[in-house]
Structure formats: C-alpha cells, structure tokens
Amino acid sequence: DAKTTQPTSMDCAEGRAANLPCNHSTISGNEYVYWYRQIHSQGPQYIIHGLKNNETNEMASLIITEDRKSSTLILPHATLRDTAVYYCIVHISGSARQLTFGSGTQLTVLP
Amino acid sequence: SQTIHQWPATLVQPVGSPLSLECTVEGTSNPNLYWYRQAAGRGLQLLFYSVGIGQISSEVPQNLSASRPQDRQFILSSKKLLLSDSGFYLCAGGTSGGAAKNIQYFGAGTRLSVL
C-alpha cells in the first residue's frame, strides 16, 4: 500500500468545516483512498472512500486531486463528537490484506 | 453493513494465565476477519487475518494464536500471557471483491491489562 502523510494535529471551531489533508504521492492506479476515524478508546469507524472522483455521503465529503497525489476530507459542520484521530489510507481494491494505519491526524473540535 | 461483536470490553489477567477473546460477525457471510492490536497512542498493528474457515495468516511472530472455527467466528488465544501482551485488541471484518466491499468494520475493542 502507498504511504500517506497527514498533519499530526488540527483544531476546528464547532460548526465550521473541518478540512483534513492527506498526501499520497506514490499512489498507484488500482489503489483507493479510504478515510477512517477513531474516537478515543473505540474501534476505528469507516467514513468514506474514493478512487478519483469526489465523493459525498452523510458523514463527509472526499475531494481527490486530479493527479490523485493528495486528497482532503471535509466535515462540513464539525461537532464536538467529531473529535477523533482521522486516518487516511490507500489500499488496493479487492485485497484481503490489512489496512495500514499510520499516525493519522488528531482533530480537536473546539466549542 | 457488518456488525462486529467483540467481548469483553475490559480484561485484567495475571502473567502466565491463558487468554481467549472472541469475535463474531453479523450481517455478511464469508467475511475476511482480522485481529489488530493497538498500543497506547500508537497505530494499529495487524496480528492475524483469515479469508475462510480454518485459514489463518500470521503477520508477526508472537505469543498469540488465532482460530476460525466457524465462518463468522474469530478467536484470539494465548496459553500463557506476557506483560507485553497488554494492549487494545480490535477485531475487524471485511469482504473482498471491489472497493465498495473492501471496507473494514471494527468491533468496540478489548482493553487487556496483563499484571
């Protein structure tokens, strides 16, 4: 799996959009971008994934650059419950191999 | 989506005692199953994964073993726990075959303290 680079930590005001960046400059053509988050002392939670088109679901939006070397996860209206570590992962579609979780970004939503 | 049931939530065991953590999956058949361990403040380390009944792949040499006696049951075991086995253990389930099915769903985790 390609390596990803994320900022160690970010703060966001409650109610504002949280934009979490991820660099994956060595991503290959058959690798998808996945985002998970882990709230303290809980198991990771899947958020969203994409290949090259922008994606949106009820939790977040995923913006992938045209060259696919970076992406941004957007939480449109952050709440205190969104405080968590956010992991950006690139993974080959259909592979049974494990997800490689890096250090992620600690997002703190401030009241 | 899948639901991963994992228990207990917290476990305190003495050094040298045996361990058995059970994970069951609901909502899918023939899932890929995974056991991860997470040390405090660190990322997830894959311990074992299984693509079918009786099929276990070990990622790192260690004091633990895994078994998959049924399609939706995954068990993590140890005959004699070590202090270094303390950590947060997570079971996950996923399916292969296309990106939409390659999502892994995680259980709530078991926090193991070996004293």
Image: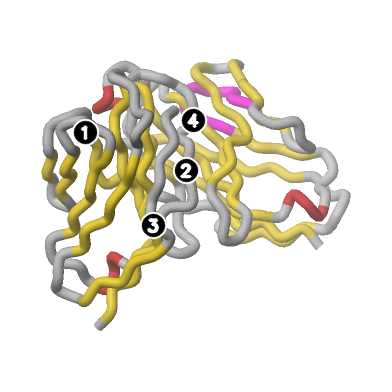
Q: Are marks 1 and 4 in contact (CB under 8 Å)?
A: no
Query: Three-letter amino acid code at disc 1?
Result: Gly
Q: Which residue is mark 2?
A: A101
Q: Nearer the viewer, residue B4 or A94?
A: A94
- Whichever of labels 2 and 1 marks the residue nearer the N terminus, that label is 1
Tags 2 and 1 in contact by the CB under 8 Å rule? no
| Image spot of residue B103 (x, y percent) | 33, 33
Residues packed near mark 3 inside 10 Å, few (<14), some (14 to 19) or many (20 plus): some
Res B88 quadrant in image: bottom right
At 38% across and 39% down in the image, what residue appears?
A89
Alpha carbon distance from label 1 to label 3 = 20 Å
Tag 4 secondary structure: loop
Q: Residue at x 51, y 46 (%)?
A: B6
Q: Sequence order check: which comes first, mark 1 or mark 3? A: 3
Which numbered tag is attached to residue B55? none
Helix, strand or loop for disc 2: loop
| Mark pair 2, 1: CA separation | 17 Å
Residue to which mark 1 is pinned: A50
- The residue type indicated by label 3 comes to Pro
Residue visible at 39% across and 30% down? Answer: B94
For label 3, the SS is loop
> What crowding class fits label 1: few (fewer than 14 Cα within 10 Å), some (14-19), or many (20 or more)?
many
Q: Is residue A43 above or below residue A18?
A: above
Is the residue at mark 1 from the same chain as the one at mark 4? yes
What residue range appears in magenta?
Answer: B67-74
Q: Quadrant location of the N terminus of chain B? A: top left
Q: Nearer the viewer, mark 1 or mark 4?
A: 1
Q: Label 4 is placed on what type of residue?
A: Gln
